[in-house]
Image: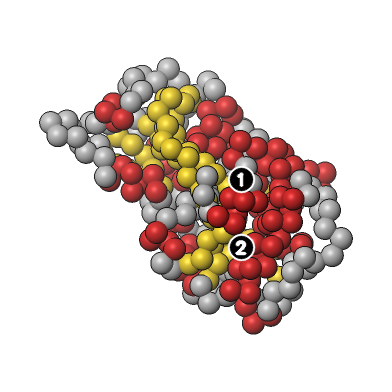
Amino acid sequence: MLLTPRKGAIGAIVALLILAACQANNAGTSPSAAIQSTAASPVATVPTDQLKFPGKLVACIDIPYPPQESFDDQGNPQGSDVDIARETASRLGLILDVENSVFSTIIPALTGGKCDIIISAQNINADRLKVVDMIPYFKAGQAFVAAKGNPKNIKAKDDLCGKVVAVQEATTELDYLQGTTKAGKPAITIKTFVKDNDALLALQSGTADVYFADSPVAGFYAKSHPDQFELTGLTLDVAIEGISVDKGHTGLRDAVKTALLSMINDGTYMKILQKWGDQDSAITADQVNSGKL
């Protein structure tokens, strides 16, 4: 049985995810909440043959994963990743189109031509860099969410032993759990889900002891539903996230990087992150160029 009926973020996200599966994805936004671009003209040009559709920038995003990506009350994509993607498109003289994607197949979706870029809370790692180019744009740690009161008393890594942990498949969180073993301790039971919000619902329904996600997302749920969830205090090191581009599309990659740097330099990037409470995840222009924290 789920906890108290919800009219807030979680219930809306689940309902709108179902709705979105039945309608075309788009990049609509609430005009009153939009960040006004300061770019007077395109800062770079993308070769037409490196775009799925002329005049559009199609972004693969796995929704929901708030505050970076979710749906608004009308079923339109929103969040800091969506706004960064929209601003990137604007600075390239393009219109954003969002392709709601499954995270475990999001890279094949890109390399298979279903989208032009991925902007979806992807940590940059060696395995991904073998397949795609990644432009640093965000930083995030990883955190665990427990039911209110932390009834399983999860405070340290060893406390995960013998517990049931809910996590989205194909994530670095899953990689971490699969590599976490302790001699003489009971194994972690890992429950994986195609969509991240289903992992959260496992915690909410009591079929998991803890939910594991990036820190901005974990913090969002704990703050939005303080009567149901809380952070355990167990966190992992910060990692850089990247915007993925097909390795063959170097012109697109360089143009996206130029657009990102321009919005960092004129302050639009920080305004977007502040709008969604993600300002602590900002990186600098030097980090975009170096890929280092």
Is 76 in front, or is 170? 170
Can you see residue 199?
A: yes
Q: Is residue 129 left or right of residue 45?
A: left
Tell me residue 165's x, y (percent): 33, 36
Q: Residues within 10 Å of mark 2 (few under 14, many from 20)?
A: many
Most foreground residue, 54 or 151: 54
What number is the disc on residue 59? 2
Mark 1 = which residue?
A: 283
Q: Nearer the viewer, residue 191 or 207?
A: 191
Q: Residue at x 57, y 27 (%)?
A: 223
> What is the three-letter code of the residue carrying label 1?
Ile
Q: What's the coloring here?
A: secondary structure
| Nearer to us: label 1 or label 2 | 1
Residue at 53% over, 32% down: 219
The residue positioned farthest toward the bottom in the image shown: 49
x and y percentages locating residue 1 in the rendered image: 41, 30
The image shows residue 113, relative to residue 2, as above or below, that is below
Q: CA distance from mark 1 to mark 2?
A: 21 Å
N-terminal label among 1 and 2: 2
